[in-house]
Image (tube, helix red, strand yellow):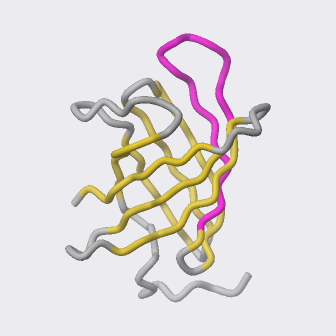
């Protein structure tokens, strides 16, 4: 993969996001899941927690406004780790922040889900 231009408008390095909606579960508006992104040369990794997620990690790649991720997290329900894959589209909001629209599937479930996260400034 060729090096990514660091001035690219879609670069996720150092950005933080909060979930605003999900078809998989109700989002707690007072304590939504929050995501922290790091990006280097198109490779993405980071962590997330909040709402029902105790601790989560993700890794993937970005090509323009398209992001492919694999993730795993532990929940407050105390069950086994939850894992899956997602395809994300980065959108630019009128105020200059980013929105991530994510289609994801949990491992072992063919039902597609959709979540939306917006950048925290």
**In the rendered image, which quarter contains the N terminus?**
bottom right
Task: Please say whether residue 55 is one of the residues in the magenta stretch.
Answer: no
Residue positioned 59% across, 71% down in the render:
66
Residue nearest the viewer, comparing 15 with 26: 26
**Residues drawn in magenta:** 67-83
**In the rendered image, which quarter contains the C terminus?**
bottom left
- Residue 4 in the image: above or below residue 34: below
Task: Please say whether residue 81 is one of the residues in the magenta stretch.
Answer: yes
Q: Tell me the quarter of the picture where residue 21 sits.
A: top left
Residue positioned 49% across, 44% down in the render:
47
Magenta portion: prevailing SS class: strand
Residue positioned 37% across, 42% down in the render:
34
Residue positioned 66% across, 44% down in the render:
112
Judge left or right: residue 95 versus residue 112: left
Q: How far across and how far down the image is residue 91, in percent?
A: 42, 71
Q: How far across and how far down the image is residue 61, in percent?
A: 65, 66
Residue furthest top as drawn = 78
Q: How far across and how far down the image is residue 28, in percent?
A: 30, 30
- Residue 111 in the image: above or below residue 43: above
Residue nearest the viewer, comparing 10 with 41: 10
Judge left or right: residue 77 versus residue 96: right
Q: Tell me the quarter of the picture where residue 42 sits.
A: bottom right
Q: How far across and how far down the image is residue 65, in percent?
A: 53, 76
Task: Please give the count of numbered marks on the rendered protein.
Answer: 0
């Amino acid at each position: 993969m060729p090096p990514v231009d660091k001035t690219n408008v879609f670069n996720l390095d150092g950005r933080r996001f909060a979930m605003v909606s999900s078809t998989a579960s109700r989002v707690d508006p007072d304590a939504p899941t929050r995501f922290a992104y790091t990006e280097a040369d198109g490779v993405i990794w980071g962590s997330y927690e909040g709402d029902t997620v105790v601790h989560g990690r993700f890794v993937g790649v970005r090509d323009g406004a398209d992001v492919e991720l694999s993730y795993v997290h532990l929940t407050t329900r105390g069950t086994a780790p939850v894992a899956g894959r997602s395809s994300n589209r980065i959108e630019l909001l009128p105020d200059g922040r980013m929105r991530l629209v994510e289609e994801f599937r949990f491992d072992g479930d063919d039902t597609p889900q959709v979540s939306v996260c917006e950048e925290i400034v």
